Image (spheres, rainbow, N blue to C red):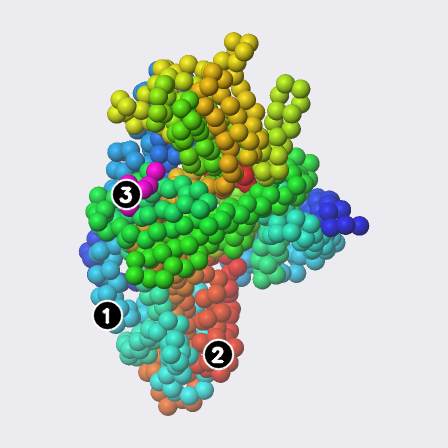
Amino acid sequence: MARVKIDNYAYREVPRLGFVGWLRWIWRQVTSMRVALILLLILALAAIPGSVLPQWPQDAAATRGFIEENPFWGPLLDRLGFLDVFGSAWFTAIYLLLFASLIGCIVPRIGVYWRELREPVAAAPTRLDRYEPLTSEGDGDPPAVLASARRSLEGGGPLRWFTGYRVRVDERDGRDGSELALSAHKGHIRELGNLIFHVSLVGILLAMAAGSMLTYRGQALIVEGDTFTNAVVAYDSYESGALFSEDDLDPWTLTLDRFDAQFDLTGNPTSFTAFATLTEPGQEPRAVEAEVNRPIQVDGAKIYLQGNGYAPRFTVTDSAGEVAFEGAVPFLPQDAVYTSTGVIKVPDVTDGEQLGFSATLLPTAVVDGDTAQSLHPAPTNPVIYLRAYTGDLGLDDGVPQNVYELDESQLSPVRGDDGEPLIVAMELGETIELPDGLGTVTWEELPRFAAFDLRRDPTLPWLLASAISALVGLSMSLFASRRRIWLVAPVGPHAGRKTTVVTAAAWAPAHDAGVRDDLERVLQQATGRLAEDPTTPEEP
Amino acid sequence: MNAQQLSWLALWGATALYAIAMVASSVHVARVADAKVAARTKATAAVGAAGTAGHARADGETASALPTRSKAAGIARSTTLVGVILNFVGVVARGVEAGHAPWSTMYEYTITGTFVAVAVFLIVQSRRDVSYLAPGVTGFATIALGIAMTVLYEASTGLQPALQSFWLVIHVSIAIIATGVFIVGAVATVLQLMRDYREGGTAWLQRFRWLEATPSPARLEALAFRLHAVGFVLWTFTVMAGAVWAEHAWGRYWGWDPKEVWSFVIWVIYAAYLHARTTQGWAGRRSAVLALVGFVALILNFTVVNIVFQGLHSYA
Ligand code: HEM
């Protein structure tokens, strides 16, 4: 044997559709199968750059950095879509082509399947020699023997349609006169599973496409004690699909009562829990909890706990002694021990210049000579290092500003007695006085904040259903067997005799070793004897 | 002895036993090959003498001539069995030590995956004689465990909040089982290709007489297909469970994170393999090559992708 040839469609050689119909069927299969195969391989290849190169949707900062570092390749790859592979025209083209081919392939196959189910089973081949036949002699006349084989093949019980064979028996002219031929076929479950699987793939694609149009998603950061109201303006960032209307947002409110963060001794997080109160319109407020893997459910949406950190609360008075700022300021954690940075902007001073502060929080500060660092994320010894600025915060020119950054272009640092920019360390509850009577800063409290990601995608149940049916179809298709069994018993010259000689053969794809057992079982059931097996070559 | 030491000792024991099993099973396979060749020569001679085709089996597989119960086979079987038990003890002890299912680091994934691969082999072996797969499977297990113990070892830690989930256990355990099945499938496919090219006359393969101990390429293909089919269904489930988990943990079911990209690529390559099996001109050698490409992607996903690419999965 020079080369393995596995032809799963060999059983189609049993004439049934007629030669031309058969050719057309094969041609259709072969051409589209090859196209599907090539498209699948291209799809796999095309996805790889998406994991190797930085991607805009996944990591915009890294992608920007990549383009800046590679002045030639960066912009070129960007223009060719390699920095957003999964949104690129070529990737979309590949999978749309694949699905076009899939639909073009599946529709005719459903038709063929439907007709096949209603057609009678194909008759047994006239000669069984090429299928390594077995023979056995059984008591009773041929019709009785074959009837018993038929019962055994068709099976019984409610699962009959799934587990049994479809059977037909004809009387026909054989080489030695008249004979009864039984033909049994099983394979419709396999094909059904295959169809279900491929149709479900289309279902998955449709659900994902619909999902991207009907979904909305927003991020909100809530400080302990604060309340969030579900409206587009309240989100820090918000995006929605083309078909989602903002009027559909249900105005519920969410109050973050307490955020609990647990760390082990080395500072690894062990649990995060947000305890909150949810009030839906027209309903009693109820207590809810969110953990990293357990979102809060509300109005068809889920609220995921996405991040957390500290939001120190400050009061700032200006040079006139008036309170110019009061509130909690979220600080962004920069590392695993929650060294966090944030800025305080004080635009509304009664007179003089605007104030700005940039600050670093060390939750468990340890000072070592000139440097200080945090040893643990829990607030055991929280210290804030504060740098003050005066000048123009640049808030009035209408350009939206990043709340976590100071625009220092029109600000000048407040200097200490030595003329260097002043950095003050402050502890919780402390009030510091700024030089030159600029005012005071008081650190009142250290609440935590929780960052939530809210998402509604009404197509998720459809997606899940498609995925499950794909899995079921796939299992049916790969594990159900495709078998043919034939039994032939001559009636002519032996008429009137008490026993019947049965010749039996079977066909199944090469990987299905169980078909011989099936055949022997049926033959034994029919004749009451073990089959004689003169030659059973181990390997075909 | 605490759980950590027990795990450590058991796994080194398993590594050593797998190594012995590899040698013993190789010896066995070589013996079977010799016996088959000898039987075939005799059969051909007999046929020649009788002048008729008779009932002589073409590949000389007369049951009596095959040394299926040789001493080497016995050693291979018992060392593999004890090895897999020790491997299991090592995995469980590690889980006890870590306080969670032992598959959140590369080290844990490797020791568990090795156990599954050998267990899958033993399950198949209990149904039919596939001892020709033994050198490949135990060899792979020896190397993988050895690398795990020497390079990948990390002390156990608690789990990050993002990893504490029922879905972790489901998603990762099925992924490991799928990997184990694919490993055995890949061994069968490699044998299939070697057998196939040897029969096709490829020169350097003629030296490997032990290949005579394996069944025909068509039967190896059939076995490999069954394994790959099981692996593929499990992998499909892995990807789906991963999406459910991602939906719970990160609020999106699919985000093209490097690990997700590669899981998808692996899935698509194996799907292409399943198609290729029934496509004219691709069945046989080419589809076998696709299965191996899928296996390489699987290994890359576990090694390079874990180490090099940053993503939400990179704590693995
Ligand atoms: C999104 C693209 C596709 C994917 C992911 C896919 C996946 C699969 C998988 C996993 C199998 C093996 C399991 C089974 O037998 O059901 C399979 C089988 C099959 N596919 Fe597809 N398929 C795709 C597109 C197509 C297309 C376009 C065709 C059109 C020819 C096609 C025709 C078939 C056929 C005929 C089989 C049965 C092979 C056999 O006899 O075992 N598939 N497909």
How far separated are the C-alphas under marks 2 and 3? 74 Å
Q: Are marks 2 and 3 on the same chain?
A: yes
Q: Are marks 2 and 3 in contact (CB under 8 Å)?
A: no
Residue A473 x/y as whole percent:
36, 60
| Residues shaded magenta | A231-236
Residue A122 x/y as whole percent:
28, 69
Q: Is residue A437 magenta?
A: no
How far separated are the C-alphas under marks 1 and 3? 60 Å
Work out which residue is located at the far front of the displayed protein and give it: A320
Q: Are marks 2 and 1 on the same chain?
A: yes
- What label does residue A119 carry, if any? 1
Nearest to N terminus: mark 1 or mark 3: 1
Of tags 2 and 3, which is closer to the observer? 3
Say which element carries label 1.
loop
Residue A484 x/y as whole percent:
37, 67
Q: Chain of mark 3?
A: A
Nearest to N terminus: mark 2 or mark 1: 1
At label 3, which amino acid type do we have? Val
For disc 3, the marked residue is A232
**Pick the front one: A77 or A531:** A77
Q: Chain of mark 2?
A: A
Q: Residues within 10 Å of mark 3 (few under 14, many from 20)?
A: some
Work out which residue is located at the far top of the displayed protein and give it: A419
Q: Is residue A321 visible?
A: yes
Q: Is residue A16 visible?
A: no
- What label does residue A524 carry, if any? 2
Residue A533 x/y as whole percent:
51, 70
At label 2, which amino acid type do we have? Gln
x 49%, y 17%: residue = A435
